[in-house]
Amino acid sequence: MSEIPWMSTLELIDAYGKGDVSPAEVVASLRERIDRVNPRINAFVTLLPETADETAKKAEEAYRRGKARPLEGVPVAIKDNIHTRGVRTTYGSRLYEDFVPDEDAVLVERLKDAGAVILGKTNMPEFGVIGITENPLFGRTVNPWDTGKHCGGSSGGSAAAVAAGLCPVAMGNDAGGSIRIPAALCGIFGIKPHIGRVPWYPHLPGFDLLEHEGPLTRSVEDAALVLDVISGPDRRDFTSLPAYPGSFVEDMKGDVKGLRVAYSPDLGLAAAVDREVAEIVRESAFAFADLGCSVEEIEVSLPATSEMDFIALTISEMVAANEERLEEYKAVAYPPYLPFLDLAGAFTSKDIVRIPYRRYQLWEEVRKIFERYDLLLTPTTAAPAFDCGEVGPLGPPDVEGVEVGPAGWVPFTMPFNMTGQPAASVPCGFTSHGLPVGLQVVGDRFREALVLRAAAAFEKARPWRQARPPLD
């Protein structure tokens, strides 16, 4: 079936149940496509053909016996910083190129228990620190829509794999935008659920106050189905939330009539936004009025501290986690990181302790928005995918002629890691050069289902799955 690479999770499950196609046929079809396409985009860095074949055969038997589990036979890719028992997990670093975990991450356990077929591991920037995907170990992952441009990061390999039709679902994580940024640049759906919704265990030290685990998919309902499988408490992660009281798949259904929607073009943080991105996102935001929502553009000025706080936290944690091997690491590190490693020594204990205070200041401003509105809409990124350089750059040199700095093109995502709220990126259009644009949908605390419902309503009104990258 030539359409297998583009089938959604729910379409695959339906086809399996009807006997129209088998899990083994799907895995074989995807492997053929991976063999053909992956050398061009470098999304997968480790493949598990024997394990995938074995799991697919077991899935076929489960369907024959009428014992199929929620994700039986569904192919899934796993980001290379999510632990997989017996499978190399490198964090994109030469320091961990031979690291093989002896246990699965909680979300991998749950995917396996639900019958998913693990295809392999996907590329990421070293330790997931930056918003592009390249590292000294595996090199660069490029954008399926234009292989001369970046795919975003840090879950860039996962986003590129889904966008290129290599798998219907890929797992990522998000400490500053790492699910939403590549989802936007690659034209797919990605959701960062509320912090703690999906347990994060085990993991190397770092990002402990910011990390959110979540899926990247080609449809909103697929993401809801995966969240139903992977969310819920686990005693090994004492920060994990109590079980969600319903079903994300069920609670995302229905219209969005009557919702109060705020739209901000800049959050008071963006120095500049690409003209086409701004126009496409604005029009998409006000399209929610056609869905029965009241939409209002608001003026907001969030505290401009989250970028430096993110740098201080992530760099300090990365240095502390590898302190005993720091000199060894400097010899093999991704070159643009080296100035940051030296910067870590400049932060004092007071600098780090002040970060939680500023998080509360940020929340005070964000809380005021959600006392008046149900949802907040913004661009996901300030610019579309940009050209790849020799090494880096970490971001476009400027946006609309304004120098914005290494993280100035992604000012919209970090604040909501600081507050821990659910947020998603929804495909909302293309630039004149055929590059995807993402609309960020932010919900109040614990309201993933509402974010999913709004995204699904937008998807229904403006379907995006028919658009495919020009890889064939």
Image: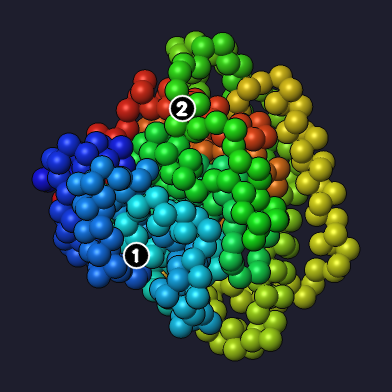
Residue sitting nearer the eye, 247 or 262 = 247
Q: In this rendering, is residue 120 above or below 246?
A: below
Looking at the rendered structure, the kind of residue marked 2 is Glu
- Nearer-N-terminus badge (2/1): 1
Is 64 above or below relative to 98? above
Left or right of residue 251, residue 444 in this image: right
Which residue is tagged 1? 120
Amino acid, disc 1? Gly
Between 205 and 128, the residue placed more toward the observer is 205
Q: Can see residue 388?
A: no
In screen coordinates, is 357 left or right of 418? right
Report the colour scheme: rainbow
What residue lies at 45% left-to-right and 68% top-to-bottom? 84
Q: Quadrant of residue 361?
A: top right
User: Residue 444 at x, y = what percent?
Assistant: 66, 31
Q: Quadrant of residue 432?
A: top left
Q: In percent of the image, x 64 and y 61: which residue is there?
A: 236
- Which residue, given by chain and number where applicable, does mark 2 sit on? 250
Question: In percent of the image, x 38 and y 39: which residue is there?
Answer: 222
Q: Secondary structure at mark 1?
A: strand
The extreme front residue here reads 65
Badge 1, how many Cα within 10 Å: few under 14, some, many 20+?
many
